[in-house]
């Protein structure tokens, strides 16, 4: 009887060891983690956008300055003086794509009613990117909404340009 009990106990102990051995199939391995820290983008305006002198249509007009500094109007306004597109330079990670965006709701203020500045465009192409040296230069044009019977005088304001990695 003692032998049967010992065999029975041995079978139970052996069975439990066999049962635990089924869980010995687990494995642990290390994974890999990576990160890319981008250089801070530096952005400077080298030439201020200037619509030049405008002899405005008394009914109001939309004045456009192109990215090459050419002024045009949808009405009969006449542009003279020395217009200039905004010129910008950015530095960042070489050969890296970026987006260029502009602020909204910008105004030029002066002696009369504020004039809206908007519909910005740039000449950096459809897929702007820093060159192999990490540089990006581009020009900016926009529309200026001149009100009916706009008061004569000097108007100025600001707009924002954002260059960001894609």
Image: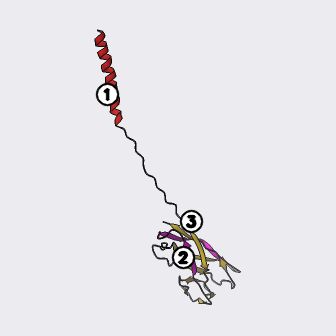
Q: Residue at x 40, y 44 (%)?
A: 29
Give the residue number, with chain letter if any, for mark 2. Answer: 119
Within 10 Å of disc 3 (Cα), the crowding (few <14, some 14-19, many 20+) is few
Q: Is residue 103 visible?
A: no
Q: Disc 2 and disc 1: Cα gap in Å?
A: 76 Å
Mark 3 or mark 1: name the one nearer the start of the chain. Answer: 1
Mark 2 or mark 1: name the one nearer the start of the chain. Answer: 1
**Mark 2 or mark 1, whichever is nearer to me:** 1
Q: Residue at x 60, y 89 (%)?
A: 79
Give 36 or 79, whichever is nearer the viewer. 36
Q: Which residues are magenta?
A: 84-109
In the rendered image, residue 44, in percent from the top left (x then y), is placed at 60, 74
Within 10 Å of disc 1 (Cα), the crowding (few <14, some 14-19, many 20+) is few
Give 156 or 3, whichever is nearer the viewer. 3
Res. 25 image quadrant: top left
**Mark 2 or mark 3, whichever is nearer to me:** 3
In the rendered image, residue 41, in percent from the top left (x then y), is placed at 56, 68
In the rendered image, residue 65, in percent from the top left (x then y), is placed at 56, 83
Give the residue number, with chain letter if any, for mark 3. Answer: 40
Q: Disc 2 and disc 3: Cα gap in Å?
A: 27 Å
In the rendered image, residue 152, in percent from the top left (x then y), is placed at 68, 85
Q: Answer whether residue 93 is magenta in the image.
A: yes
Q: Residue at x 35, y 33 (%)?
A: 23
Give 52 or 89, whichever is nearer the viewer. 89
Secondary element under disc 1, as helix, strand or loop, is helix
């Amino acid at each position: 009887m003692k032998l049967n009990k010992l065999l029975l106990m041995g079978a139970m102990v052996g069975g439990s060891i066999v049962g635990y051995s089924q869980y010995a199939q687990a494995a642990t391995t290390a994974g890999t983690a990576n990160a890319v820290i981008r250089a801070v983008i530096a952005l400077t305006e080298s030439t201020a956008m200037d619509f030049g002198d405008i002899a405005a249509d008394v009914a109001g007009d939309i004045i456009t300055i192109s990215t090459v500094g050419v002024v045009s109007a949808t009405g009969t306004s006449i542009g003279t003086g020395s217009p200039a597109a905004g010129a910008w330079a950015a530095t960042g990670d070489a050969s890296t794509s970026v987006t260029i965006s502009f602020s909204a709701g910008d105004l030029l203020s002066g002696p009369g009613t504020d004039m809206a500045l908007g519909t910005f465009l740039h000449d950096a192409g459809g897929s702007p990117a820093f060159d192999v040296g990490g540089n990006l230069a581009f020009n900016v044009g926009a529309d200026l909404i001149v009100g009916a019977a706009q008061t004569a005088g000097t108007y100025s304001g600001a707009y924002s340009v954002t260059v960001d990695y894609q």
